[in-house]
Image (tube, rainbow, N blue to C red):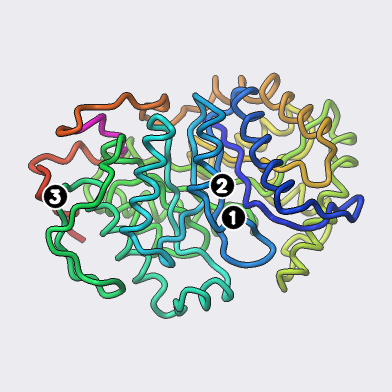
Amino acid sequence: MKFLLISLIVHVPDPVTGTQPSTGERFREVIDNAVLAEELGFDGFGVGERHERPFLSSSPPVVLSHIAALTSRIRLFTAVTTLSLLDPVRAYEDYATLDHLSGGRLELIIGKGNGAAQRELFHVTPEDQWDRNAESYELFRRIWRQGKVSATPRFRPALTDAEVWPRPLQRPIRVWHGSATSRESVDLAARYGDPLFSANVTHPIEPYAELISYYRERWEHYGHDPARAVVGAGTAGYYAARTSQEAIAAYRPEFEGYLDLQKRLGLEPVFATLEDFVERSSALIGSPQQVIEKVHRYHERFGHSAIHLHADAGAFTQAQHRASLELFQSDIAPALRRDLPGPPFPWAPVLPGPETGTGPDTGTGSPPETGAGPGAEPSAPAP
């Protein structure tokens, strides 16, 4: 199993002290946590994308490029790239550049995004957001694989033998599809043989397990090898200590901050008490053995091979945050790596291939696409 730390770069007052860091200080916290993730042996670090308060994550390529310059091994994730809001040509340029700067360590998790404010900012409607997401992904996918692209999309100007530079280092880049509540994103992932990353944060396990089961059904429907389906899953929170009592006591201020953030966003919390949150959510709070057992319970339903933990200290002191992550790596991760398989594809940085040829194929479910020279797009699996 692989382990990621992820930050949405929420910018709110500290739940304990009430003080709010400056924007620059908040970005520095994220950068420091990414460097810590590599130091402690985590497999990936992700940055979200939101275009509304209280988030500072509107430009993941910039943040991840800075992290790439300070790290050498850890894979860099977007969580998620909101393709329903973006011009896929411009997004491709940013991420192809980042892929080179990071030495082939980029992984994309794409999704439509959410939030009325950012939809209004980009003039996207609830009615067209799924169509935009699918169209942008399919065009993005073609640009990443082809030297020249002609297309007549609905939501951006047409392309005629367009060449988009730079050409990527990873050919193609691996794209995960973020999934929270909708079958549209799940079906899109299954159709193209791409891995799925379940949000698995807001609700109890049932709706996420149903979507993952649907993903596996559609995966087989599109003719892919069931053994090659790959699922990742989020967690609603994490804090481990030597005893469950110590972990729960330490987590209480963080949970109160979670309730406050839900109120700020105008959302009704699904878990009204910390005890219910620990019991029914995906949060990993307790002793190392309790955390291991809970991941196993979720794995029985999901069959997932990667999970993410929150990268931010939140209500914890930096010493508490580091100690908990160190405990994860010393007492929890080794057992999970031993017992649960990781994804069936390479995880190390990618070596560059010839500029005129193709580098390593980093896909998952589908075999390498053939007959796809610089000017030809392989057809997608039939619906």
Q: Residue at x 45, y 51 (%)?
A: 212
Residue 245 vertical position relative to residue 352 in the rendered view, above or below: below
Locate residue 9, reporting x and y percent: 65, 51
Q: Residues within 10 Å of mark 1 (few under 14, many from 20)?
A: many
**Res 196 visible:** yes
SS at badge 2: strand
Task: Please say if the residues under marks 1 and 2 sit with CB atoms less than 8 Å apart.
Answer: yes
Determine which residue is flagged by label 2: 47
Q: Quadrant of residue 51?
A: bottom right
At label 1, the amino acid type is Ser
Q: Residue at x 69, y 55 (%)?
A: 10
Q: Quadrant of residue 36?
A: top right
Q: Is residue 215 left or right of residue 75?
A: left
Determine which residue is flagged by label 1: 57
Q: Identify the magenta region.
A: 358-364
Determine which residue is flagged by label 3: 378
In front: 84, or 58? 58
